[in-house]
Amino acid sequence: ERHAVGGEYGAGWKACGKGKLVTTFLPDDDASKAFVVDSRTLSNSENVCVVYHNPLDNVPDLAHHFFTRCLAANIVPYVVTKKTVFKWQEGFWTIMKDVFDTHYRAKYVAAGLLDQCGGELQHLISDAATMQIIRWTKGGFGMAAHNYDGDMLTDEVAQVHRSPGFITSNLIGKRSSDGAMIKEFEASHGTVADLWEAHLRGEETSMNPLGMVEAMIGALEHSAALASASEDAGKYSSPEEVKHLTRSLRKAMHDCFRLGEGTRDMAGPSGLTTEQFVDAVKVKLDEYLDPAPKPEAKEPCPSGVAPDPRFRRNYNVDKAAVSELFKEYDTNSDGAIELAEFEIMLVKLGVAPQLKPKEKHKEDETEMNPPV
């Protein structure tokens, strides 16, 4: 969860030369109680001066939303800040912890989610959070952070999974007039702009639309929930009907990726074009939406297709060295490594599987007399 207000995104700035910079606060109720927030001398001939603030009034709402979601998903919550250096972030952590301790701690303890955390809400320094996201590959955790930290962490999650197409952005707020929940769903900014330009030029594209479709799914489910609570509820599809559609669509997309019909950011050059992927999803979606009973499949369902490691971001193999190594173990130079050659190669490389040592019995032992 990202506290998507204030911070660097709402900053004011100016380029300045040498001089003195003073930031002053003027209270709305009494300007005579103004005070200086910061005063500093600028000694460089070129400077950029930046001013921003972190609003905190809605952090309790963020806390309730975050802890409710983590509890429902049965995962461990972490609050991420850089408060050891950025002292002004202490308030964010304090509010989050107060809400947790007052309303949620007992529920998390009962669920066993704090067994490995000493029974307390955990704080992560933002630097550590970026490393833990890479290490905690099995998931099971949630993070709440300030605006900029949340932005970076979501981008990192997408890159760990090899595609910014996985990012979706769900903005949640309250209407000031009546406190009603407002939700906005969108794909992450900038994830398809270059592909759209290529499409307009008539070029072939292979766009991963998962983040965009997840945003649409969120919007559809939220609108269905709102409609069901309105006076005209009978005019619209029920939330259950909408969820049948959205969950079928999500399953169709996931299965396409899982079974080797993904876009090229995941499947490499053999992946589908944008249009081919849409067609593949439609085939599966029609099947999942069809209420008619399906005949038993004669062929076993295909297993998931593992992604080709050659298309990982950190793939940096010396192909020339690999070619020389292949020639060394292709002893008959037929362009293939046979089983016997493969066995010798594994032995020389020190990675050959070994047989389990034969278990000895007492009767197999031979008494050895020392030499005279």
Image: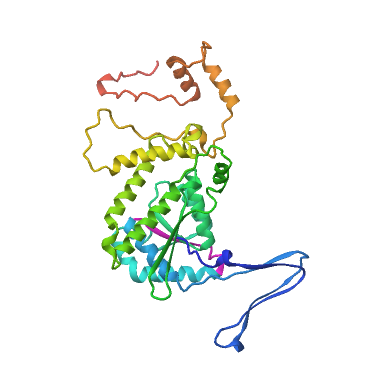
Q: Quadrant of the C terminus?
A: top left
Q: In the figure, is residue 114 to the left or right of 268?
A: left
Residue at coordinates 39% horizontally, 37% vertically from top-left? Answer: 280
| The furthest residue to the top | 332
| The furthest residue to the front | 235
User: Does 338 appear in magenta?
Assistant: no
- Give x and y (percent) for residue 356: 34, 25
Colouring chosen for the image of the structure: rainbow
Along the line of sight, which residue is nearer the eye, 247 or 354?
A: 247
Residue at coordinates 48% horizontally, 50% vertically from top-left? Answer: 157
Q: How many marks?
A: 0
Q: In the figure, is residue 97 to the left or right of 289?
A: right
Residue 328 is at least partly visible in this image: yes
In this view, 258 is above or below 180: above
Q: Which residues are magenta?
A: 74-87
In this view, 339 is above or below 4: above
In this view, 206 is above or below 335: below
Q: In the figure, is residue 219 to the left or right of 25?
A: left
In this view, 72 is above or below 296: below
- Give x and y (percent) for residue 2: 47, 61
Q: Quadrant of the N terminus?
A: bottom left
Residue at coordinates 40% horizontally, 16% vertically from top-left? Answer: 371
- Give x and y (percent) for residue 297: 25, 31
Along the line of sight, which residue is nearer the eye, 143 or 94?
A: 143
Q: Quadrant of residue 22?
A: bottom right
Along the line of sight, which residue is nearer the eye, 250 or 333?
A: 250
Residue 119 is at least partly visible in this image: no
User: Does 83 appear in magenta?
Assistant: yes
